[in-house]
Amino acid sequence: MADTVGAPGRHSDRRSWVIVALAVMVSMALVVVISTSTSGPGEHTRVTMPEEVVSGCPELGIAGPAAWEELSDRDFRAMVDEQVLLGSTWIRLSAVWKDIEPGRGVYAWDGLDQRVDAAVEAGLTPLMLIQTHPGWLGGFGERGSGAAGEFGRFAGEVAERYGDRVDAYEIWNEPNLARFWPDPDPDAYAELLAAAAPRIAAEDPGAHIVSAGLAPADNVAGYSLDDLEYLERLYETGVMRYADAVGMHPYSFPELPSGTSEWNAFRRLNEVKSLMAARGDGDKMIWLTEYGAPTGGDRGVSERDQADMVVEALRLTVADPRLGPIFMYTMHDIDLGAEESESYFGLMVGPGDPKPAFLDLRDAAGECSRKFGD
């Protein structure tokens, strides 16, 4: 996708999905129907936006697309207020290295400064995703080239600048996909994580360091590596000692997270836990740094099904002491083309226009209870 932060309509490597006809949506208590009921993907029933703020859910966060980086400060703050209204307490922001350091030692922090300030002032806790590489950097992804050391230097500067406002750092996004890491190589990523984690810890002691959220994928030459095999290789290198939590992106659509299909990445979290336990990491948490479902485009689901998926995913996360927090991708639909499923991952169509997923997730957020430390 065009976005820096991944969303997974793209993660269909291990299956072919057939979308069946979906039941007609019914009106929900607390909302006023303004148009006709939704019957399938791509159709939307406009409802009124709730006004009362619910208690924040300690396990609920929102992950952002690259489109957030183009929002004005005013629009970003309005969107953050919607997240608070939802009951979110975390927000996944992105430190995009190629934009922040376009020339070595030349920095442009203003945009990220504004987003961090807006999130913190609204009461949200940032998870800082550090990713991409600038054009001036040679040898990226090549072990021993020195590129990992440069990334580590930049990661340390991010932590130095935001350590008083950021509680966690995620090192890269979906490096098992070629769209985010050319010629995916877990050994090269291990070098990157080993370079970044100590620099972050030196600047922001006590912060959580999360390994890169891995995309559900099969082994496809030149395109992707199986997420579980990738994680197994990271453990073999010994680099996971640097991570306080394991990042995963357990997309399950068009199936509920509780579904039993072999390709269901939420179900496969049990295999992740088993792998971690076998490596002596049975007590380490798994952070779900992206989860969601599209309501239109190829492989889209109905708005009703999207709502059921995100609510169940949150409840399963809250109930499992090994999981959390979970970051829903994302707040608003974005325009990547009418046929592109990645245009429709929003919990809302746009500002002030919630889908059932927003309303139902807001209700579920009020049921949350904290299970991990600050």
Image (cartoon, rainbow, N blue to C red):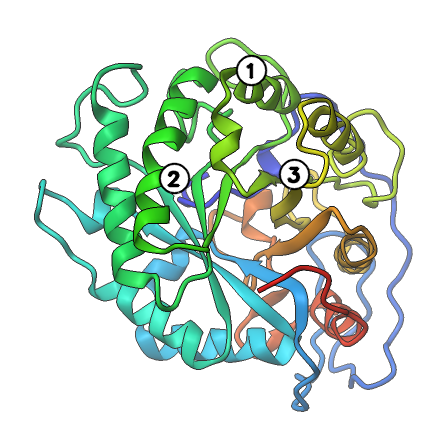
Amino acid type at image mark 2? Ala
Q: Where is mark 2, residue-wise?
A: 197
Residue 218: quadrant of the picture: top right
Mark 3 or mark 1: whose residue is earlier in sequence: 1
Q: Residues within 10 Å of mark 2 (few under 14, many from 20)?
A: many
Tell me the quarter of the image containing the C terminus. Answer: bottom right
Amino acid, disc 1: Glu
The residue singled out by tag 1 in the image is: 236
Q: Tell me the distance, in whole angstroms, between the alpha carbons under discs 3 and 1.
A: 37 Å
Circle 3: residue type: Asp
Residue 85, can we see it?
yes
| Residue at disc 3, secondary structure | loop
Taking the spot 50% from the left edge, 67% from the top edge, the residue there is: 125
Single out the mark in the foreground, 3 or 1: 1
Q: CA distance from mark 3 to mark 2?
A: 38 Å
Left or right of 38: which side holds 239?
left
Out of 170 and 216, give the one closest to the viewer.
Answer: 170
